[in-house]
Amino acid sequence: MFDFLQDYDLAGAIWTTVQLAVLSAVGSLIWGTLLAAMRVGPVPLMRGFGTAYVNIVRNIPLTVIILFASLGLNQTLGVTLGGGDDFETINFRLAVLGLILYTSSFVCEALRSGINTVPVGQAEAARALGLSFSQVLRLVVLPQAFRSSVVPLANVLIALIKNTTVAAAIGVAETALLMKEMIENEAQLLLISAVIALVFVVLTLPTGLILGWVGKKVAVKR
């Protein structure tokens, strides 16, 4: 029944999906944290930038962002993000960039919700001790915010893993692109769909369960 899978590099497609998810998750966490810091910061210009970025980017379809990264940045402006390599490698990098730009807006909001759970008195006490805003954020607020945001961030990560399928729009050889190829070549629509669905269940279900357990363990007791 599954003999046709031998003709396709399913393991390679899954590995590409995992790479997309991991690299995009790391980049989104970094950029999303910076955006959250801007949104709660004391500088009006930075607050305005953070607010505008989040409200604009998260309301743009991810497909549009991915296509802009490929057609706009690469084919129009010649951006390769690391040198003139082959087409697939360049589009992989651009897909990661697009996923980071999009997902970081949701990371920002998840972290901002965690920041809002930190009592204002703690930040005021830290400032009374002479700490700067960045020190208060780094030493007092963000550690508690991250602990409160594990479950929302887990939901963002699960969504990110599923969103990697959009990279197929620019030819990145991940699982969704392989699914399209298999459907075009094989008369096994239901079976192929079931296999790919199982792949994403295996990727997302343990992630949600593990991070949900971590969230309960590290949750700040109020």
Image: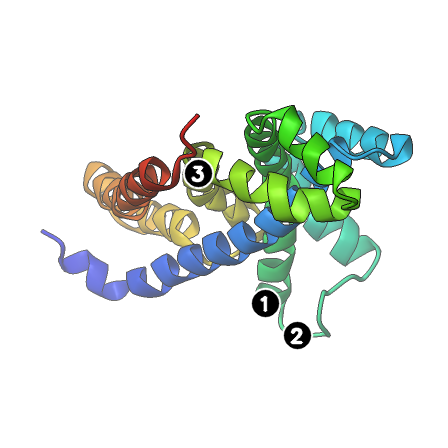
Q: Secondary structure at mark 3?
A: helix
Q: Which residue is mark 1?
A: 89
Of the residues shown, which amino acid type is indicated by label 1? Thr
Asked if 22 appears above or below 6 in the picture, the reply is: above
Q: Secondary structure at mark 1?
A: helix
Of the residues shown, which amino acid type is indicated by label 3? Val
Give how far apart the Cα atoms at labels 3 and 1 are: 32 Å
Q: Position of residue 221 (x, y in %)?
A: 40, 30
Q: Is residue 56 left or right of residue 186?
A: right
Q: Position of residue 14 (x, y in %)?
A: 35, 57
Q: Disc 1, disc 2: CB below 8 Å?
A: yes
Q: Which residue is mark 2?
A: 85
**Badge 1: few (under 14), some or many (20 or more) residues near its Cα, within 10 Å?**
some
Give how far apart the Cα atoms at labels 3 and 2 are: 37 Å
Task: Give the mark nearer the N terminus: 3 vs 1.
Answer: 1
Q: Residue at x 63, y 48 (%)?
A: 139
Give how far apart the Cα atoms at labels 1 and 2 are: 6 Å
Q: Which residue is mark 3?
A: 150
Asked if 218 appears above or below 51 in the picture, the reply is: below
In front: label 3 or label 1: 3
In which quadrant of the rendered image does the C terminus lie? top left
Q: Secondary structure at mark 2?
A: loop
